[in-house]
Amino acid sequence: MVTETILQQLVLFVPELILTGTFCLILLTGAFTKLRDYGTSTLTLIGSIAAFISVLPTIGVQKSLFAGMIAIDSFAVFFKLFSLVCLIGITLFSLHAGELKLVRTRSAEYYALLVAMTLGMFLMASATHLLMMVLAMELTSLSAYVLAGYTKEAADSSEASLKYILYGAVASGLLLYGISILYGLTGSLHYTTINHVLAVEPLSRVPLALVFVLLLVGFGFKISAVPFHSWTPDVYEGAPITITTFLSVASKAAGFAMLIRFFKLVCVNPVASVEAGYSIPLLPIDWQLLLAVLAVLTMTVGNLVALWQENLKRLLAYSSIAHAGYMLIGVVSFTDKGIASVLVYLVVYLFMNMGAFLVVMVVANKTGSEDIRTYRGLGSRSPFLAIAMTVFLISLTGIPPTAGFIGKLYLFAAALDAQWYWLAFLGVLNSVLALYYYVRIIRNMFLRESESAVPNISLTSGEVLLLGALLVPTLVFGIFFSPIVEIAQKSIVMLGVP
């Protein structure tokens, strides 16, 4: 009977099993065959597509697996598909990355760790047990630590990896300490059980508040929220551009999935919320106000520091921090519309942010530089590249008719509906502030003459296709955005259903 139950549950766990098999197959292939970059990347793509297809039958399913440690629901499905799209995109990016050409002999380890990171993100989005959440975070983080220092021949690569490990170790330690206190208070690590204990039993306010702060450190580290963001610019600058892109999009999305599920299942009184028609918190502190303050700090610090950056990877790192602040606005609202707005923003952020990093990668491949001065005269040296970069930057700013405008519109509208007027106002102000450093790049591309030493940039057909695949959705979803909104709304329908 137990075996039959496990087999039934494994049917819904097929996507994770496919990624596990892909991970093992890539390592074995690298160890015992002469297949290198194209062979291992092909295996990664095949495994990713197979996992993507296997996720589709779980749409609309509501199940709890392995003694309540994993949830299979529409919310998890959304983030699984999101992570796989990112993995496929980064795999294609990697085939054109100049930084990786010097280390092609280690390509099996590279792609295997990418798959392992994706598996960790799957589990982060699905975890309904604190132990599973920690294991998923560590699987993702340990893979990311190694990948951040993958190009160890570069001077700043090993430094980036070391800083990432040190910051990650501190964040993980504080997170585990908070979990141990929470277990002592409630006697359980299951989200639903903890929620029930918080709802029916009076607990000491001080240790419960301490638990929330310690857990927030772990969540803040994963999403690069201020003041837990210090690792982000150094790691993003030192890591290969492909890994920087993966961390800024997929890893951040998994962090938000974990944060939203935890707050939804643990920190909200389900009975009182239904009766009142809005979320009734269980914690002894106003966690929404605290998250609102973090959102403002994250937006403002990210945008202000980005103003002074000369390195494009570092500039986009601080931009990524600011965008985490925007997405926190949706979490603060914590209505269905607010959570759906975060999902909408993640989708549009995927295309515009990956597109911007792809342009940086292409320019770095051709010129060997990531400095903003390298972009002088790019409009005449490579018009298509400059136009694409302009669209991505305009979308990151949130100017219509790009997809970025729709993403921010839904975030700010959710804040207004939840009566967080001052938070929405500060979000708009920060978007205006961000316009300055994005326009600075556009000015260099079209209004500054190129330096004589800078070569012309020609694009390969693969680079053109990749840019087009990211550019088209950035423009199309700025006008025809209803499919994304519908998907986001359907993805949160069963979130929190026991």
Image (cartoon, grey):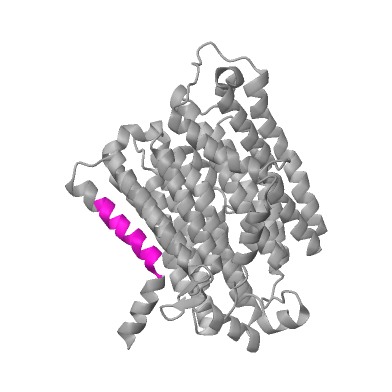
- Residue shown at 46%/59% (left/top)? 121
Q: Is residue 63 visible?
A: yes
Residue 274 position by quadrant: bottom right
Q: Where is residue 180 in the image (x, y as percent from the top left)?
A: 49, 75
Q: Position of residue 234 (x, y in %)?
A: 50, 41
| Secondary structure mostly taken by the magenta-highlighted segment of the chain | helix
**Quarter assignment of residue 196:** bottom right
Judged from this view, the residue extending furthest toward the top is 452
**Figure label count:** 0
Above-or-below relation of 192 to 460: below
**Where on the picture, by quarter, is residue 203?**
bottom right
Residue 214 visible in the picture: no
Quadrant assignment for the N terminus = bottom left
Q: Residue at x 59, y 65 (%)?
A: 491
Which residues are the magenta region? 13-27
Above or below 358: residue 230: below
Residue 266 within the magenta-colored segment of the rendering: no
Q: Position of residue 177 (x, y in %)?
A: 49, 70
Quadrant of the drawing holding the C terminus: bottom right
Tell me: 185 left or right of 276.
Answer: left
371 or 353: nearer the viewer: 353
Residue 387 x %, y %: 62, 28
Tell me: 57 left or right of 201: left
The extreme left residue here reads 32
